[in-house]
Amino acid sequence: MSSTTTAPGETLAPGAGPATGAAAAGEATTPGTDPAALTAMLGLDDKVRLLTGASAWTITELPQVGLRAMTVSDGPIGVRGTGEDGLASAQLPAPSATAATWDVRLQAELGALMAAEARRKGIDVILAPVVNLQRSPVGGRHFECLSEDPLLTARLAVAFVDAIQAGGIGTSVKHFVGNETETDRTEYLSRIDERTLREVYLAPFEAVVEAGVWTIMAAYNGLARDGVEQTATAHGPLLEGILKGEWGFDGVVVSDWLATKHTAESANAGLDLVMPGPGGPWGDALVAAVRAGEVSEATIDEKVERILRLAQRVGALSGLPGTVEPYDAHGATEDPASAETVALLREAAARSTVVLRNDGGLLPVDPAANGGPKRIALIGHNAVHPFTQGGGSAFVTPPHVSDPLTALRAAYPHAQVDVHRGGATTLKAPLVDSAVLRAPDGEPGIRIDELDADGALLGSLTLPDAESLWFPVVRGETASVRLTVDLVLEASGRHVLDLGPVGAHRIAVDGVERSASDHVVGAEVILDSSYSNPPHVEVDVEVDAPRSVRVEADLQVVDGESYGRFVRLHFRHRVPGPTLDEEIDAAVAAAASADLAVVVVGTNPETESEGWDRPDLALPGRQDELVRRVGAANPATVVVVNAGAPVILPWLDEVPAALWWWLPGQEAGSSLAAVLTGEIEPSGRLPWTLPADEADVPVPNGTPVAGYIDYAEGVHVGHRGWDRLGRTPAREFGFGLGYTAWEYRSVEIEPGDGASAHVVANVTIANVGDRDGREVVQAYLEPPATPPASDASAEASDRPVRVLAGFAVADVAAGAQTTVRIEIARRAFEVWDVDRSAWHLPHGEYLLRISRSSRDLRLAVPVTVDDRAPL
Ligand code: BGC
């Protein structure tokens, strides 16, 4: 080791502070925490050790330079933590929901909550937000993205990042870049032309870098761009070239989990931190690559400095060699179920909700004793089991989920509210009830025997329930486990046992083998999410008198690399019950005799998740039929759509009222009640386009073909694609009725300050309804009909019909008017000139459309860009 050594407790010479200037406001330089000076104290082995995670969620500590271990946690729906604290997490509405508020103030409040949650859980960096775009509605992580529009995504992401970082917590904005598909997600190359990359997919990343983000996560996929085809973690022109070079990013580029496939290539390409660890392609191999001259030590030093700068920013660097700063939990909330948190999450979920239809003003439904509904039929699988968050790494365990039935009963105290499921929508059976589980000795639970490679018994334990059937295996010699359990089946009729083993297994029921596989699996089941969606083995058991049935399963121990060794079995059980037809009939009958029917339809954990894309946009099960029959039975029917990503609603214009309620997070029921009663106006506007027909969708899927995904629609993504093709969706981007009516009175243009705004539109709107309301005023820019002859650039002639250029949210009392200020940045007018590799401002007469949605265009004002008024 060639490091300078410093005795414990000895202070370093005062450092010069962060080397570059994009640090967040208020960042102080602590004497002795200069990243360059500290890096110079370290030897190569220690430096390289810092560049790979210490565990699934921690970054290596180096007490010799006063660096404590930093801990990271997934977002963006809440702060899950490392899974070791046993603490529940505040569960936010999904990002696609909060984006529907178009409200940067609210987004910032949610960011502040995330920062406080991180503090409470001892987290330094939150792996969020996702700023990939909703390119195709079938994308598995659609719910985790904010919008199909780059500007809306960028504005909301910046507000979120700013608020989290202002709380002293880092964010890792992900997944850089072109990560819009889950199918084969670690393998494909996104082929994106340079102009599209710059104008669309890089734009939100560029915005957060400009705002001073502390880390960026390099994606699983690769990028085929300008002759370089490389995975994102080793893409030099992307990481070193654009991100660190052109944009001057001074933070840490962290790999997505297990995404790094190369040693020297990724180190030289600009990746700074391999996660998770230990292990992986760096470590000793990287030390050897430095010694062999394949990677320079200066390259290593730069990475170390970046990580130390991050530590400095989150308060993980004491600057006192041999001592580490304790975690500073300043600003932590007490409780994810505190009154303030509940109120904020309820407001966010209610404000996100989009009124898709409200015929005859059915909504809101006043609960007042006289004239309010006396009988409410609450219907739907999702009314009973609200789908509050999508699946995958964003998953958090909330302190509670507000139940729609309880919330509606509280909101309508004078009504009788009953709930009817109307049939299951999931293919899989519900999780087995632990009350029916008995270990062979008769004690409640499931017996687990750990076996070595020769089948010898190493030890036994009893698990209390089926949820714990994903358990870490600590004993190194354990090669497999044998699970034995008796299910006590009381009810007569057909029981279905539904078992989902992960990896090699043998399953027997009452001594009869039902499934066997020798296919040994590893960490890939985490990357492709098949550990949460394994093939299922169904066994029917007819019961005519109470009896037990024995399940025995031999299961492999999965080596999840840095995720640890574990066993997993999904154990589900469907008890005898009414048929789907009977349940639908019962729900329809209940609707017919009620004053109000509220049908909650939607997706479920089998539909929306990281790890897989959806095969189609249909609502699962027979929900379309349920809606049509309930609507026919009761003219006062409100349909509530509980989904994060578009589903086709073929009955949308046949029912009197419909709300898009998203994946609403822990305040599901209370937000629904607030919206139905009108206590909070559902002022959401769609952040994506809702198709009427699957055949119309401009990008129907993002499935890789021979390893490539071609972004052939170019810059015409989302609503821009719909406009270009002249297709009519069910509801367009930006749509949302709210509960009042608006008049758009005037728009005036003035020059901007030249920094954030180059043009400002002052728009006067009036609330002409009889309720106070919130409006989202949207500004779209249409390019010159014909670019000037002097402008021969191809980009100037292939521009979107209109782009979202700005927006503002206004609260206006009934009968009042207000003037909102919408700043339009120069970038909204610009195109990327591929030949010059620079932004280009085509001259001509633009039209600024002031609108209620991307199609409800209310006012227009020309904006001329020429040599005299070049912006
Ligand atoms: C996901 C990331 C996530 C990481 C850690 C990956 O599979 O793509 O979004 O942050 O896992 O859970």
Image (spheres, rainbow, N blue to C red):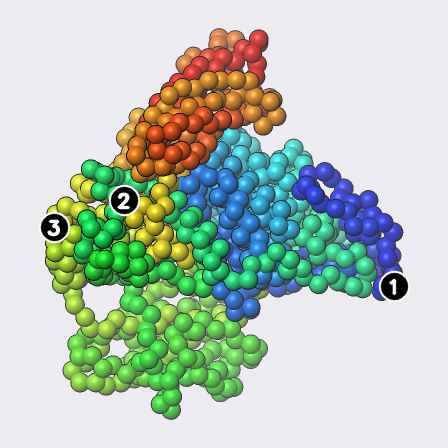
| Mark 3 / mark 2, whichever is N-terminal | 2
Residue identified by numbered label 2: 364
Is label 3 or label 1 in front? 3
Circle 1 sits in a helix, a strand or a loop, which is it? loop
Residue identified by numbered label 1: 7
User: In the depicted view, which residue is nearer to us: 32 or 228?
Assistant: 32
**Residue at 86%, 57% in the rendered image:** 11
Q: How busy is the neighbourhood of tag 3: few (under 14 within 10 Å), some, or many (20 plus)?
A: some
Could you tell me residue 375's position as x and y percent?
A: 18, 56
**Residue at 38%, 74% in the rendered image:** 466
Is label 1 or label 2 in front? 2
CA separation in Å, label 3 and label 1:
81 Å
Residue 390 seen in render: no
Q: How busy is the neighbourhood of tag 2: few (under 14 within 10 Å), some, or many (20 plus)?
A: some
| Mark 3 / mark 1, whichever is N-terminal | 1
| Mark 1 / mark 2, whichever is N-terminal | 1
Residue identified by numbered label 3: 633
Amino acid type, residue under disc 2 in the picture: Pro
Which of the 4 image quadrants contains residue 212? Answer: top right
